[in-house]
Image (cartoon, rainbow, N blue to C red):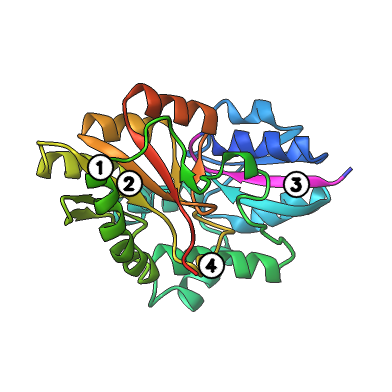
């Protein structure tokens, strides 16, 4: 039986991915990133080990020992950590291996954007014998699909904001600035950058206390789906509703709903319409 390694960050996606891999007939080796993975994640795995966030050489050795044929890197790792004091403490505690130091200074010194960092890491892991696969490989049942996903369709005003904002989001994502933005009455309220979607949602609520705005989220067409696939979970929907969002537009096949049935149920309960936008021709 084939074994898949799941390199797990925060949230429930690693556990959902493990369930999908098992359903596909794979055994699962869980590699929990120390300080990030969900404490419940090991229960989803046939075998589990903690690994250092800054020691990818250990990921490779652990995967090889278990005979893994592929690996999935999934779950949140807040990039804001890299710009915080906590990151310096992590460096002292984790003691980055030579692999990390070589990768950081040889390939990432002059471009540390999330997309480039993760793409470079994935390419380098493959060169060293650990091939990462598309993060959605075992999550096909949890992807956003085309059309209205919830019970309520968008209003004319929401549809107008969706159409207006989607063209702008496409440009923003192509520039690797962020994967989300907020729009109300064909005006951009805010754009996601390094702070992440949840903080952007909070900012949108502060800037637009009247509510009635639309959240748009997707990836660039050439986005590397091996890493950093955008995700919407129950918490995202609840935070959006609390901040006055009434419509969420998602790239079909490009955004994961973390436990799709539960996310859709939450959106219906809170009166938010959710729409999957097909890729451009």
Q: x and y percent of residue 90 in the render?
A: 42, 48
- Write the residue at 49% across / 55% down: 228
Task: Please name which of the two marks, 1 or 3, marks the residue nearer to the observer.
Answer: 1
Distance between the alpha carbons at the discs numbered 2 and 4: 21 Å
Q: Main secondary structure of the magenta part?
A: strand
Badge 2 or badge 3: first in the primary sequence: 3
- Write the residue at 38% across / 77% down: 110
Image position of 268 with respect to 107: above or below: above
In magenta stretch: residue 3: yes
Residue carrying label 3:
4
Badge 2 or badge 4: first in the primary sequence: 4
Question: Can you tell which quarter of the image residue 29 is in?
Answer: top right
Distance between the alpha carbons at the discs numbered 2 and 3: 29 Å
Q: Residue 119 carries which label?
A: 4
Task: Please name which of the two marks, 1 or 4, marks the residue nearer to the observer.
Answer: 1
Q: Which residues make up the magenta segment?
A: 2-11
- Write the residue at 50% across / 78% down: 106
Residue carrying label 1:
201
Disc 3 is placed on an element classified as strand
Instruction: Tell me whether the residue at label 2 lies in contact with that at label 4, contact meaning CB atoms closer than 8 angstroms.
Output: no
Say whether residue 163 is left or right of residue 250.
left
Residue carrying label 2:
197
Q: Which of 89 and 146 is in front in this view?
A: 146
Quick one: label 1, few (<14), some, or many (20+) residues within 10 Å? many
Quick one: label 4, few (<14), some, or many (20+) residues within 10 Å? some
């Amino acid at each position: 039986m084939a074994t898949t390694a799941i390199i797990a960050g925060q949230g429930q996606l690693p556990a959902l991915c493990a369930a999908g891999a098992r359903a596909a007939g794979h055994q699962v080796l869980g590699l929990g990133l120390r300080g990030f993975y969900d404490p419940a994640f090991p229960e989803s795995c046939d075998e589990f080990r903690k690994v250092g966030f800054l020691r990818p050489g250990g990921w490779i050795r652990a995967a090889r020992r278990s005979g893994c044929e592929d690996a999935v890197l999934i779950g949140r790792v807040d990039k804001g950590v890299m710009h915080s004091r906590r990151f310096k403490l992590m460096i002292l505690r984790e003691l980055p291996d030579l692999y990390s130091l070589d990768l950081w200074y040889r390939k990432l010194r002059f471009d540390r954007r999330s997309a480039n960092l993760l793409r470079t890491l994935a390419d380098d892991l493959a060169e060293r014998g650990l091939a990462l696969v598309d993060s959605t490989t075992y999550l096909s049942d949890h992807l956003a699909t085309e059309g209205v996903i919830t019970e309520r369709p968008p209003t004319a005003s929401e549809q107008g904001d969706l159409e207006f904002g989607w063209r702008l989001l496409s440009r923003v994502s192509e520039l690797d600035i962020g994967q989300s933005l907020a729009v109300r009455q064909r005006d951009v309220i805010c754009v996601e950058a390094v702070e992440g979607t949840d903080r952007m949602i909070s900012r949108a609520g502060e800037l637009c206390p009247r509510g009635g705005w639309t959240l748009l989220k997707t990836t660039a067409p050439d986005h590397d789906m091996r890493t950093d696939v955008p995700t919407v979970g129950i918490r995202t929907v609840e935070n959006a509703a609390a901040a006055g969002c009434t419509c969420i537009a998602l790239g079909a096949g490009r955004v994961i709903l973390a436990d799709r049935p539960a996310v859709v149920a939450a959106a219906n309960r809170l009166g938010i319409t959710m729409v999957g936008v097909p890729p451009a021709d």
